[in-house]
Image (tube, helix red, strand yellow):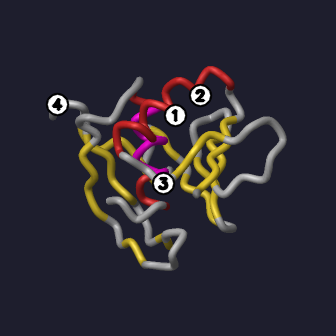
Amino acid sequence: MIVIACEKRGDLPWLRRLIRQQELCARPADGGEHWDLLIDRRGNVRCAGQMLTCGLDGRSSLSVSSLLQEGGMAALQREMRTLDGDLRRPREIPLKGLPGTLEQRMAGAAVLLFLGKI
């Protein structure tokens, strides 16, 4: 079971929806418990010595590439490794169907990338 921590307590309901919706083998962290993934206050996701920064600019690891398509699209700008060590190369990622605000959908995509789901 993967433990996911949120620095913003307000993200917990959204994270629970993401876990349930995507049927992830994961759960939110309880308090100061050890975590496998961390969603920081800025919506970036840290895991296994890596961090995927999420934002609107091209310098972010995961950036918004289109808002014209339903739900939006994100672009993974550089290679990264999943928790299982698989390589993910730069690609476009649809945000359609992910819960929450644009910032939360971006963080959700980063979580799914780390878990090897996309």
Residue 32 in the image, given as x and y percentages of width and height: 84, 41
CA distance for labels 3 and 1: 13 Å
- Identify the residue under disc 2: 12
CA distance for labels 4 and 2: 24 Å
CA distance for labels 1 and 2: 5 Å
Q: Residue at x 40, y 25 (%)?
A: 100
Residue 71 in the image, given as x and y percentages of width and height: 24, 31
Number of residues whose C-alpha sits closer than 10 Å to that of mark 3, classed few (under 14), some (14–19) or many (20 or more): few
- Identify the residue under disc 3: 25
Q: Is residue 79 above or below residue 104?
A: below
Q: Amino acid at mark 3?
A: Cys
- Identify the residue under disc 1: 15
Q: Nearer the viewer, mark 2 or mark 3?
A: 3
Q: Residue furthest right?
A: 32
Q: Nearer the viewer, mark 4 or mark 2?
A: 2
Label 2: which secondary element: helix
Q: Residue at x 69, y 42 (%)?
A: 29
CA distance for labels 2 and 3: 16 Å
Q: Nearer the viewer, mark 1 or mark 4?
A: 1
Magenta region: 103-111
Total residue callouts: 4
> Going from the N terminus, do you reach mark 2 or mark 3 first?
2
Quadrant of res 8: top right
> Going from the N terminus, do you reach mark 1 or mark 4 first?
1
- Quadrant location, the N terminus: bottom right
Q: Residue furthest top?
A: 10
Q: Amino acid at mark 2?
A: Leu
Q: Is residue 44 above or below residue 34?
A: above
Left or right of 97? Residue 12 is right
Q: Nearer the viewer, mark 4 or mark 3?
A: 3
